[in-house]
Image (spheres, helix red, strand yellow):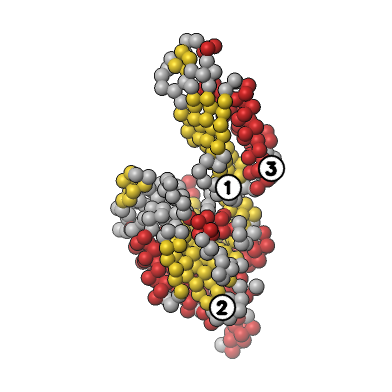
Amino acid sequence: MKKLLAILLLTPSLCIANTVDEMSSAIESKVVEWRHHLHQNPELSNREFKTAAYIADHLKKLGLEVQTGVALTGVVAILDSGKPGPVVALRADMDGLPVEEQVDLPWKSTQRGMFNGNDVPVMHACGHDTHVAMLMGAAEILVAMKSELRGKVKFFFQPAEEGAPEGERGGAELMVEEGVLKNPDVDAIFGLHISADTDVGKVRYREGGVMASVDPFKIVIKGKQAHGAYPWLSVDPITTAAQMIMSVQTIVSREIRLLDDAAVITFGSIHGGNRSNIIPNEVELVGTIRTLNEAARQHIYEALPRKVNGIADSMRAQATLTLPLDYSYPITFNDHELMAQMLPTLVNTAGQDNVLYSKPVTGAEDFSFFQQKVPGVYLWIGGKPVDVAPKDAPAHHTPDFYVDDEGMKLGVRLLTNLTLDYMAKS
């Protein structure tokens, strides 16, 4: 016993880690209860009013300074240790999706909401319910460990990560504009996303670009209408569109150094014409660009109008490119220095064998708006039951999406330990 006490006195971080483990185990049932409530009562982007009230009530009971109505429905709370030190921000997103749940759970969602004027089912089909519950748990532990802290912790419960409704703004971009990273100024920010195809107990990380930027675009091609039997009397926007689609793909396949700079250009819709024997006057194309570093992103911004205008000119058509179309997310970029600094925390929290170096993904995350302003790290934690094969795991944003409650315990511990270790090292 004396030897163990001596070890703990010499290595206080070990003692703190044990305390975090014990406390996360003690509140695990509460975290699960919060998650089930949130899952059963999802709300769409910019409509998270009841969710925000539920979160704010918990944070106020912890004695935190709480601000509501941030970026319409967001909640921000501050924990002040009373001692000088860094300001750490922790973020969870809280909106659901217009998806009808097919998973047979006692806490299955049957909620409905309005999405762009339509009555739709609502489901937490991406795990944001777990994100909120994990951050509520980390807040409870950090308040209990206030004496171990230096500086301040800011808790961000963010609305509209999935995108604001038509005609509205929201999400991380609006939170940043409203000043959540200021007063006090944030030094570093951490976020987690649960993963339906990663085993419970695992955490995935990488430095640099971890999720892609997203830049939607629209091309309107105007030609000259004519009878389909007399194409020489037309300027054919459909043929022009076909050539343009194929040419644009060569930006990635022939101009981007794919060994270093993965990128995707996808056309998602084509609209033009209404009869088999009429060459229309106009065709509209809508697509998206995904890149994992800024150099590739800027190259595509230069190349796309070059391709579009060149093809249009060669076909005697006119083309108008709108880029970005209606919104734009930066690259979710994990600061190299901060990621290296916090990697030991991942290992100490999850265990060496459970820390996996991850490939980037071409999905997008508006956590990137926080990372544009301050160093940040975004991690994936496992939510897949270990007895389920990865190929059988349901995808995010689908009616069958499912993640296990068991995955949240690691998330709570990581959010807490990232905060404690960053404060200790800064």
The kind of residue on which mark 1 rests is Ser
* Residue tagged 1: 213
Between marks 3 and 1, how big is the CA–CA gap?
A: 18 Å
Nearer to us: label 3 or label 1: 1
Furthest residue toward top: 230
Residue for point 64% across, 83% down: 10
Quarter of the rendering occupied by the N terminus: bottom right
* Residue tagged 3: 259
Q: Who is closer to the viewer here, 355 or 35? A: 35
- Expressed as whole percent of the image width and height from the top left, the position of residue 282 reads 49, 25
The kind of residue on which mark 2 rests is Leu
- Expressed as whole percent of the image width and height from the top left, the position of residue 290 reads 58, 43
Between marks 1 and 2, how big is the CA–CA gap?
A: 35 Å
Quarter of the rendering occupied by the C terminus: bottom right
* Residue tagged 2: 149
Residue for point 56% across, 34% down: 321
- Expressed as whole percent of the image width and height from the top left, the position of residue 106 reads 30, 58
- Expressed as whole percent of the image width and height from the top left, the position of residue 393 reads 45, 49
Furthest residue toward bottom: 2
Number of other residues with Cα within 10 Å of mark 2, as a class: few under 14, some 14 to 19, many 20 or more? many
**Figure check: 153 above or below 202:** below
**Figure check: 214 above or below 183:** above
Residue for point 48% across, 18% down: 225
Residue 278 is at least partly visible in this image: yes
**Quick check: marks 3 and 1 in contact, CB under 8 Å?**
no
The kind of residue on which mark 3 rests is Leu
